[in-house]
Image: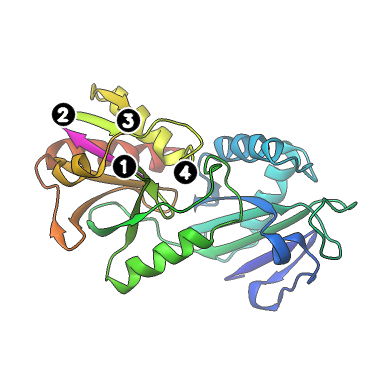
Amino acid sequence: MEKLGYYNGKFGPLEEMSVPMNDRASWFGDGIYEAGPVRNYKIFALDEHLNRMYRNAGEVEITMPVSKEEMARILYEMVQKMDQGELFLYWQVTRGTGVRQHVYPDSDANLWITVTPLKMSDGRTPIQLITEPDIRFHRCDVKTLNLLPAVMASEKAKQAGCGEAVLYRPGGRVTECAHSNVHILQDGTLWTAPLDELILPGISRAHLIKACKALGIPVREEVYYLDQLRAADEILVTSSSKLVVRADKLDGQPCGGKDFETFERIRKYMLDEFEEATK
């Protein structure tokens, strides 16, 4: 199958799948999700994604419909139905189904899965960025379906001919991108925002830190600001679909390009790790 959909045990071509109108995703975006790349029918960093999902379920009081082990089995079952092994796997759990009301429904959670073709970026081509105020609520550490601010920022980036929007809070604190984590290289050191309620603890962010430590590159998990972003030797963006990529423009102005050697060491390490894990 080229594109696959799944809903509570039923599956088929993605374009032919449907879900109940009363699913809580429709009314409130009441759910959590995970996504990541697949190569050679192997799901990259699946344990890390599942650990984050089940932790997030606890944070928003969603009772998961299956165990971690059963979830992994279902995900691999879906992946194996595909015509090719280089894919993007997305799965979400919503609180349940019921007539629209703000309090929790008396129903089981719903599991959605989509599997679509995707060729993983090797990080060689830089991207362009814009900056946008971060107008999200204060639980950005939970990977929920409430993504309207991220959608609006992404559209602004697209209209500007850019690949991502870097978000910042009042006072200029850089948090993350609309659908990625963002970091800077300065004087041979990686700066990345600390894990708090304003950023998602990205899986690729964790692998970036691991790569830097393995390569002897100092890491500072500290708050940094727009002026530091603009003056950085390199701006790095990490995500499950790109691993790591550098930026060469920010708000229409050239940026980075001062420590390409360090970026290349990091990029190669992370790509090698991905390829080894999905042989």
Crowd band around label 3 with a 10 angstrom C-alpha radius: few (<14), some (14–19), many (20+): some
Q: Earlier in the sequence, mark 1 or mark 3?
A: 1
Dominant secondary structure (helix, strand or loop) of the stretch shown in magenta? strand
Crowd band around label 1 with a 10 angstrom C-alpha radius: few (<14), some (14–19), many (20+): few
The residue identified by callout 4 is 278
Residue found 52% across the figure and 44% down from its top? 140
> Secondary structure beneath disc 3?
helix
The amino acid type of the residue labelled 1 equals Gly
Boundaries of the magenta span: 181-187
Question: How many angstroms separate mark 3 from mark 2 (CA)?
Answer: 14 Å
Question: How many angstroms separate mark 2 from mark 1 (CA)?
Answer: 26 Å
Q: Are marks 1 and 3 in contact (CB under 8 Å)?
A: no
Question: How many angstroms separate mark 4 from mark 3 (CA)?
Answer: 17 Å
Image quarter where the N terminus lies is bottom right
Q: Are marks 2 and 4 in contact (CB under 8 Å)?
A: no
> Secondary structure beneath disc 2?
loop
Q: Earlier in the sequence, mark 1 or mark 4?
A: 1
